[in-house]
Amino acid sequence: MVKRALLFPGQGSQYVGMGKDLFVKYPIAKETFHEANDAMNVDLTRLMFEGGITELTRTEYAQPAILAVGMAMFRIYKEVVGSDINYMAGHSLGEITALTCAGSIPFASAIRIVHRRGELMREAATIGGGAMAAVHELDISEVESICTSVSATHKGGSEIVVVSNINSENQVVISGHKGALSEATERLTKRGGVVIPLQVSAPFHSPLMAPAAEQFAEELNKYTFSPLQYPVLSSVTAKLYASSDEITKVLTEQLTAPVQWVAVLQYLRENGVAEAVELGPRTVLKKLAQNTTGMKMFAFDDGSDAEQLLSNSKIAKEEYPLDFIIQCVSIATCTRNRNWDSEAYAHGVITPYRNVQTMIYQLQQSGGQVTWSNMEQAYKMLLSVLRTKLIPEVEQLSRLERLLAEYSLQDKFAQGLPVGVLNS
């Protein structure tokens, strides 16, 4: 089986009209965009579909819009292509999209989180004094060396410039005080580099973002994150998240630390990933990876790529048994409850159980085909019920393994048992 990763782009990929075709063609996309509207209490779809670009580009709107498109594409991908996903990763903002698609952050919460992240970044930009620039045609180590030298000497070391994004072998981004960045630009140009100023007024992914990072940590501390259902690579560390407990720390650090995109792609290549799919507006990550990864790249926002992904999908042609969903309900019903916390029981048992019952009724009434999304909803309901009822781990594993073996689904749910079940 070919190993595949899903990649999610960051800010700057937005454009007027993004997601509109998905909204028209796929009910799950329309539902996703409506969820985003409700979470923000803003008509985000109007901004996405009609613009103008100046308003859409405002960071507090661009970030939730990009996340919403990424989530819509992910849901379509899962429903039509299937769940053979080995890794997820995102570039800066895209890391939050990856964590959301991996099930660790509820979608509505993620929309609110990135909206606040955007506000904090905008506030940092209004303070002024910072700038960013893209550097081409120079080795990364040479760019880092010049930045270090400038930071040590410019205005007596009181101003800094640092590498903020390592995007490809041929492109890095630098951030810092305007004066220090200007001096670094002169030195880099003399060494043969091509330096292009970016139209931003704040030094993102640099130590100068520390005040915004501190406030963002306070925002993240308001939320509880669930276990990851898929392995997610951090663009800060280029390592897998060990657990959702790391989310607040890593996402806070992300505002002040460089994006290690080259290292992320190297990790994927070294771990056998042969194909990667970009889920989000435009084809930014596909272009960055073309000459460096050795992986086959698809971008869902590229019409020919999307058509190839969807038309070649074997999973899309499979039929799934309604009996599996009914069996999930049966197991959830017959297991003994050991948890007398009524609030936890309502959230972890009653709500997901009723949602699956409603789904079964609708499928039976309509005669509709069971989709992979239906299968996953039922299975996630069962996991939630078993955890909430405090079923012993050995019994949980025994029931789940028997269920998956009965329907030959061991390799469909993230190699049998989703990440986090063993830690329930």
Image (cartoon, helix red, strand yellow):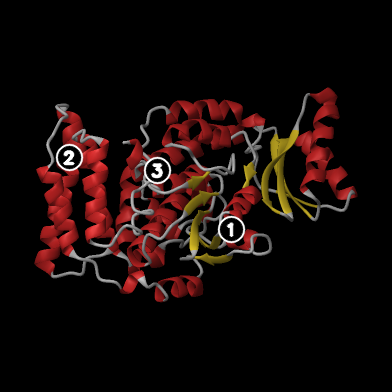
Residue occupying the point 40% across, 76% down? 311
Residue 349's disc is 2
Residue 416 or 32: which is nearer the viewer?
A: 416
Q: Residues within 10 Å of mark 1 (few under 14, many from 20)?
A: many
Identify which residue is drawn at 53% across, 34% down: 250
Q: Quadrant of residue 411?
A: bottom left
Which callout, 3 or 1, points at the residue further toward the start of the chain? 3
Relative to residue 377, is residue 131 depicted above or below?
A: above
Q: Say the numbered circle drawn on residue 41.
A: none
Q: Residue at x 33, y 42 (%)?
A: 421
Q: Position of residue 195 (x, y in %)?
A: 78, 51
Identified at 26% across, 39% down, the residue is 394
Crowding at dot 3, Cα within 10 Å, few <14 / some 14-19 / many 20+, comes out as many
Would residue 3 be visible to someone looking at this image?
yes
Closer to viewer: mark 1 or mark 2: 2
Q: Secondary structure at mark 3?
A: loop
Q: Position of residue 126 (x, y in %)?
A: 60, 34
Residue 69, image x and y in percent? 43, 56
State the residue position of label 3: 228
Circles 3 and 1: CB atoms closer than 8 Å: no
Q: Is residue 41 visible?
A: no
The kind of residue tagged 3 is Leu
Q: What is the distance, in whole Å, between disc 3 and disc 1 at their CAs?
A: 23 Å
Camera-nearest residue between 91 and 46: 91
Q: In the rendered image, which residue does mark 1 sit on?
A: 285
**Residue at disc 1, secondary structure:** helix
Residue 251 point in image, percent of width and height: 51, 36
